[in-house]
Image (cartoon, grey):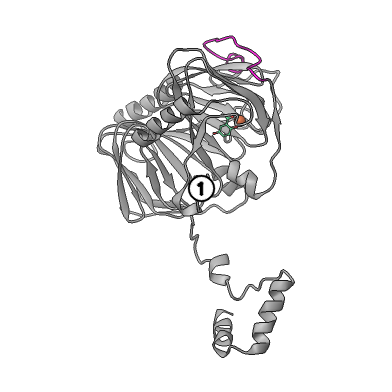
Amino acid sequence: MAHTAHAESQLSDPELDRLYADFDHAHLNPLWTQLDSLMPGTPSPRAVPFVWKWSTLYPLAQRAGDLVPVGRGGERRAIALANPGLGGAPYLTPTLWAAIQYLGPKETAPEHRHSQNAFRFVVEGDGVWTVVNGDPVAMRRGDLLLTPGWAFHGHHNETDQPMAWLDGLDIPLVHYTDTGFFEFGADGVTDESTPDISRSERLWAHPGLRPLVGLDTRTSSPMAAYRWEHTDAALREQLALEDEGFSATTEPGHAAVRYTNPTTGGDVLPTIRAEFHRLRAGASTRARRDVGSAAYQVFDGSGEFHLGDTTYSVGKGDLIVVPSWVEWSIHADDELDLFTFSDAPVVERLGFHRTITRQGA
Ligand code: GTQ
Ligand code: FE2
């Protein structure tokens, strides 16, 4: 077909020119002139590998905090990480949004709800409560907080210090599929209390135990917070078991956990996977490619990300985007703690997933 189209274009037949013009007027568009871009042999992502440094993100968020009020209408002081390959759209990848959100001392971001699923991950600071369907959830360093689609949520900072964190949402996916709804809620937050742990954790966060009031299967995890102490302990034990000669890590020196929905054992959100990885000092991951897009945020330590042909040195707070089918690997200089999220639940559910691991790398 491509050959035929090429041969035709050489002729500049006026009949053919008229045909293409008539296609255009009739809102028709032939496959044969664009097969390579519509159906490439392997994924050919428009999103590019990229790294945002925390030392760039935080001061800019701070300046927004000084200049831009947070309140009804704008809703959130959230600044999206715009992948340079996506034409200026506020998208990290074709499916994922990531933003740094900043809340000054005593500020409140009003309640609202939307179809889009969201999480927050805290790389530094504390003192903000996110109120999810009326349940106040403390945000502290190392915690993963969930805001499933259509749950009301607002955030309030109880302290005299600002706080910034990472938001992840499926905004681009919902945008491309024309599936989003949005509603305003209370102008403040519906519960201003500041408990150490949320009601959702009191009900659900007991290892291996689920309450008999919650035996139905939920699309998103009913647990609003996954606390650092549990994540850290799980990773520490994997490496300790490896030291003791037991098989506990995915590859040498590489501990990893996936955050799960306790009603299914599957991903925490229908559209977003979240995991935490710890590499021992000096450890490397095997180079691989995956269908679907992912991002990493360095929680602690330093190392290198190899993305395609480029090596990026990264440290605490830096955010790294790994587009679909780009070869990637990680090397830890000192012990490297990484939060990661991806669109894997979507890719897997639709049967699009493939991966290649380079052997002996
Ligand atoms: O905190 O509710 O980064 O609605 C983007 C959209 C955060 C939020 C974002 C949102 C929020
Ligand atoms: Fe929101």
Residue lying at 38% horizontally and 25% vertically, measured from the top left = 237
Q: Amino acid at mark 1?
A: Thr
Does residue 111 lie above or below 90 as drawn? Answer: above
For residue 248, say whether it is visible: no
Q: Which residues are magenta?
A: 187-202
In front of the other: 353 or 154: 154
User: Residue 211 versus residue 45: which sits nearer the camera?
Assistant: 45
Tell me what residue is drawn at x 55 percent, y 10 percent.
Answer: 194
> Could you say which is closer to the camera, residue 115 or residue 300?
115
Majority secondary structure of the magenta segment?
A: loop
Displayed quadrant of residue 164:
top left
Question: As drawn, is 203 to the left or to the right of 283?
Answer: right
Marker count (numbered): 1
Quick check: is the Cβ at mark 1 less than 8 Å away from ligand 1? no
Residue position for label 1 = 93
Residue 30, given in percent of the width and then of the height, sits at 65, 73
Q: Is residue 270 left or right of residue 216?
A: left
Residue 326 left/right relative to 2:
left
Residue furthest toward the right?
Answer: 26
